[in-house]
Image: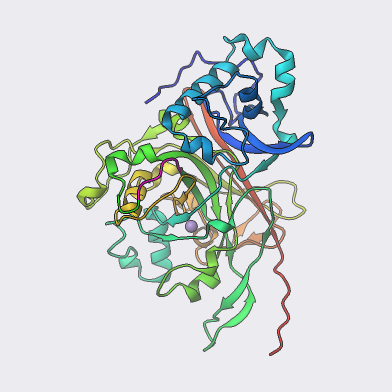
Amino acid sequence: MSMIDNNLSSFLDIASDSDFSIHNLPYGIFSDTTNDKRRAGVAIGDYVLDLALLEEEGVLTLDGGRYFDQPTLNAFIDSGRDNWTLARKTIQSVLSSSNDTLKNNQNLQDKALYQQAEVTLHLPVDVPGYTDFYSSKEHATNVGTMFRDPDNALLPNWTEMPVGYNGRASTVFVTGSTDIVRPSGQLKPNDSERPVFSACKRLDFELETAFIVGKPNKIGEPIAIENAWEHIFGMVLFNDWSARDIQKWEYVPLGPFNAKTFASEISPWIVTMDALAPFKTELPTQDPQPLAYLREQNPSSSFDINLSVAILPKNADSATLVCQTNFKYMYWSMAQQLTHHTITGCKVEVGDMMGSGTISGPTPDAYGSMLEIAWNATKPVTLKDGSTRTFIEDGDTVIMKGYSEKDGIRVGFGEVRGKVQPALEFSFDT
Ligand code: MN
């Protein structure tokens, strides 16, 4: 695995607290006002580097294919690890202060570099399938404590497998492309025998990350645990918007359905596993030891990624931080999730997105959902503008951020930022 090269620096002026250092180079899809064609770019400092242009100019040649003049990253990802490695090496070199190709060519810089603030970012991959796991022990314990039994908060299967469900890929969207419309559906008041149709009253965020599958398997052929990392391309931040009251009534016996299918919001830049490699860290101890098919030889199977959530109310001057946690608290690794997902022979595709599940840490300031932060509406949170929240209100913007940092080197994800709009109005003849 690659180590941090502290001598590597870019000729571009990049703030030390930028998520997009030369050590990162996350991939996205963008268009701009002069060219509405969607194409691939990498984020570097405040800029986007146009990879389609570099390819056209012969600066970035991989195995001969044209991978970046495309509306999604799927073709590039599908072209395989050798191309991922070559692309990263070439782009890093072109942006470095020791290479003259771009540094000393103002004409090429003018054509290839855009201000991030001036481009439109699109969904970076076509997502054929989306699965959400439930792999934070702290989160699962909190939810089990609130809704079942504090003495038996985790169900017996939880420590034996990465529990998950199949979600809706059609509702995965990139942050900024749409607002979040408060969903409506069936809610069942506690004192009522039958449900009512209503706007959701318990709208929540779920702080998650998701990984993007980089290599498919064949139907009927599980991905062995020792090969699982080879099938993962990179990661994004993920707000898995949830309607807690719809969820509560519908989820028995088959799990979440409408409560999770209205807004699955991801960050625009896919941070590669190569960029995250220096931030590997050990998984928490798994007890009991998992069954053999889920056992990883290397315990450094997690990542040190700082994560946060803030709420910006409508008309407020500044956002209030409501959660600070870390990806390293996750109980099950991404490799274990992928292996478990395919153990029956289920096929995964390039671009498939696998959500981590809500990432909660051990202390209340590290809980990754309002359900936990306000403890099932019993502990309202006071925001900077004096208002209180138990769940998310209309007009609120929920902002999630994430980054890794070590030895002065920063690799970040940017942000996910979703603003909530009021529910649609329905009128039914009764
Ligand atoms: Mn979720």
Location of the N terminus by quadrant is top left
371 vs 56: above or below:
below
Query: Residue 108 at x, y = what percent?
Result: 70, 17
In front: 4, or 51? 51
**Residue 215 lies within the magenta run:** yes
Residue 205 visible (yes or no): no
Residue drawn at the location 36% of the way across and 38% of the way down: 229
- Left or right? Give the position of 394 relative to 155: right
Predominant secondary structure, magenta span: loop
166 vs 316: above or below:
below
**Residue interval drawn in magenta:** 213-218
Residue drawn at the location 59% of the way across and 63% of the way down: 262
Residue 146 visible (yes or no): yes
- Left or right? Give the position of 235 relative to 173: left
417 vs 391: above or below:
above
Query: Residue 129 at x, y = what percent?
Result: 48, 54
In front: 403, or 121? 121
In front: 168, or 137? 168
Q: Residue furthest front?
A: 64
Location of the C terminus by quadrant is bottom right
Query: Residue 130 at x, y = what percent?
Result: 48, 54
Residue drawn at the location 46% of the way across and 51% of the way down: 355
96 vs 189: above or below:
above
Q: Is the image coloured rainbow, by chain, by secondary structure, or in one colour?
A: rainbow
- All told, the count of numbered labels is 0
**Residue 85 lies within the magenta run:** no
